[in-house]
Every structure is written in C-alpha cells, then in structure tokens.
Image (cartoon, rainbow, N blue to C red):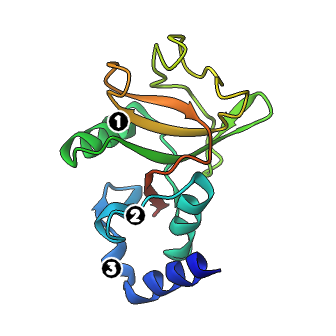
Amino acid sequence: MKVLLFLTVVAVALGDDDVVDEDRGDSEYHFAWLHDGGRTYDWQGANSYCSSLGRGWKGISIETREENDFVTDVIEHHELPWVWTGGQRRGRDFVWPSGARFVGLNWSHTGGKKQPQPDNREQGGENCVAVLNDFYDDGVRWHDIACHHEKSIICERDD
C-alpha cells in the first residue's frame, strides 16, 4: 500500500511533460532511475511504477533492432548494471505489454548455467525479461530472470 501511495504521489508530482526523458517518434520513454532516487523494484513493482506515470505507460517492449540499440545506448550511457523490461513469460512463450509479437532479438549466448538464454535456471522461475550490462561478460544482452529480483526500469508510451 505504501509503495502504491508513493507511486501515485510521484505520478501526480510529475507533470506529463516532466516524465518523458526521450521522445523517439512513435514512442516516448521514461528512465525511472532519473526520477525515483535510484530505487529498484521487483518486476511487478517496476511495471506498476510505469503504470503510475499515467495513461499508456508500460514497461518497455523492445520490438525492433533500432529500439534494442537505443536501450543498449541508454544502459551504457547511464552505466546501469541492468534494467527490467515489460517482457514476461506466458506459458512457453514470452510476451510484450504492447501486444507486439515477441522476437528474441538480443538473447545472451550465456548465463548462470553457461547456456544460451532463456535458460529458466532458477527452478523454472525465470519468467521476466531484463537487459543486463555485461553481467556474464556477454555485452548488453537479454536474460530471463526470476521476477523477485530488484532492478530499475525503462518505461514506454506509444504516441
């Protein structure tokens, strides 16, 4: 309840113009760490943070190579170790909150088990998608992660 109240206060305190950190034509982006004092969230909390920004805000859906390159640049520029996306596992597949078809553009070739991602290694509970910055000496790549881990998030709103 306190987290929801905090997120509501953040959303009200920030005018709509103040939440957009990057406008790239069809989408606007919000970098949570620039507005929340560097807090981290589990996957659900991170995506709730995005929703609290107002109508249409969700965790990022990385739908194209260009958008993936943009996310990589943001992570490298801000020297972030990792960020959540809006991606999550549904059944055997992953889905984006935008509803766009999930294409695995940037899965890592390695992980904790030294196997290609997604590897679902935490007792079959890696159901959320994060972008990790060279965590396994693999560059900025996608990993399936257990949703209870805490990270920041990039939020997205389609124009």
Figure check: 139 above or below 76: above
Local packing at callout 3 (Cα closer than 10 Å; few below 14, some 14-19, many 20+) is few
Mark 1 to mark 2 CA distance (whole Å):
27 Å
The residue shown at (73%, 28%) is 124
Q: Amino acid at mark 1?
A: Glu
The residue shown at (48%, 60%) is 158
Quadrant for the N terminus, please.
Answer: bottom right
Local packing at callout 1 (Cα closer than 10 Å; few below 14, some 14-19, many 20+) is few
Residue 151 picture location, percent across and down: 45, 51
Q: Secondary structure at mark 3?
A: helix
Q: Amino acid at mark 2?
A: Arg
Going from N to C along the chain, the mark reached first, 1 or 2, is: 2
101 horizontally vs 35: left or right: right
Report which quarter residue 140 is drawn in. top left
Quadrant for the C terminus, please.
Answer: bottom left
- Nearer the camera: disc 2 or disc 3: 2
On the image, numbered disc 1 is attached to which residue?
Answer: 66
Question: What is the residue that sits farthest to the right in this orientation?
Answer: 91
Figure check: 148 above or below 124: below
On the image, numbered disc 2 is attached to which residue?
Answer: 39
The residue shown at (65%, 28%) is 122
Q: Nearer the viewer, residue 26 or 152?
A: 152
Residue 9 picture location, percent across and down: 48, 87
Q: Amino acid at mark 3?
A: Asp
Q: Nearer the viewer, residue 91 or 1?
A: 1
Local packing at callout 2 (Cα closer than 10 Å; few below 14, some 14-19, many 20+) is some
Q: Are marks 1 and 2 in contact (CB under 8 Å)?
A: no
Figure check: 127 above or below 37: above
51 horizontally vs 154: left or right: right
On the image, numbered disc 3 is attached to which residue?
Answer: 17
